[in-house]
Image: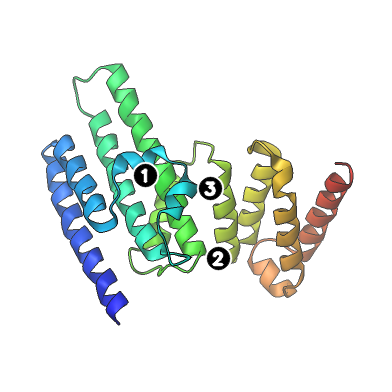
Amino acid sequence: MFRKDYLLRMVEEMTEAIGKVFTLKQQRKHAEALSELDELLRRNFGLNSSLLNSLPAEDVIELFRFRGIIEVDNLQQAARLLEEEAYIYGEKAKVEGIDDEERQHSLDEELIRLMKSLHFYLYALNHGANPKLLDAPDRAESILELTKEYERPARTEKQLAMYREQQGKYDQAENSWYRLLHVGGEHPVNYRHDVQAFYERLSELEDAKLETGGLPREEVEEGLAQLNREMANG
């Protein structure tokens, strides 16, 4: 009960701060809006935006480990703040009169934060976060739509594959694994055992569930056979 009340208080505080940030954005007070979010990160988590955006995602996640467990509900709150930062930079890029270099910088900062936020949302959802606390599923889908033209980091693509499987969207999960093996990723061989385990999990499901998930049994068997051939050939 204490932890639930604690989380709700944090969410209420964050919601209030984001409302203030929204007003500052409307007034084009972008620096003040960013400062407000940075202060909330510092106060709630002892972190700051610069640290969250400079460290690799895996290292940031470790900062949320307490007594051996990643506090995923806190992580998704940090994701929400980074997401809001991204939108501020997106608004900065639209300001008339700024030069091309400054506009591109703002767009780059927006994308960095959207990708990092997406990774944290997916990781949190894959590891037991409360999906209703911040509407994280809807927020993740929104960011996926906003960033659909960009290649996702391999670590994020893996989280997306796991999340799609969790949702029962097996065809979309397979698409993410395919991208890791054949399109992106510096070391696709590292993901072969993950993909093999994915197909083996699906092979244990009923035909009707596979059909509903968009990946009929014959396609599962075909995918696993193809992967086994690739692994045999090195």
Instruction: Give residue 185's position: percent from left, percent from top.
Output: 63, 38
- Name the quadrant containing residue 224: bottom right
> Callout 1, which amino acid?
Leu
SS for dot 1: helix
Residue sitting at x 33%, y 68% = 133
Q: Say whether disc 1 or disc 3 marks the residue closer to the N-terminus.
A: 1
Q: Say whether disc 3 or disc 2 marks the residue closer to the N-terminus.
A: 3
> Callout 2, which amino acid?
Gln
- Name the quadrant containing residue 63: bottom left
Q: Quadrant of the C terminus?
A: top right
Q: Residues within 10 Å of mark 1 (few under 14, many from 20)?
A: many
Instruction: Give residue 136's position: percent from left, percent from top.
Output: 39, 60
- The outermost residue toward the bottom is 1
Left or right: where does residue 149 sit relative to residue 171?
left
SS for dot 3: helix
Q: Disc number at residue 93? A: none
Question: Residue at label 3?
Answer: 156
Residues 54 and 179: in front is: 54
Q: Quadrant of the N terminus?
A: bottom left
Residue sitting at x 54%, y 37% = 151
Question: Residue at label 1?
Answer: 52
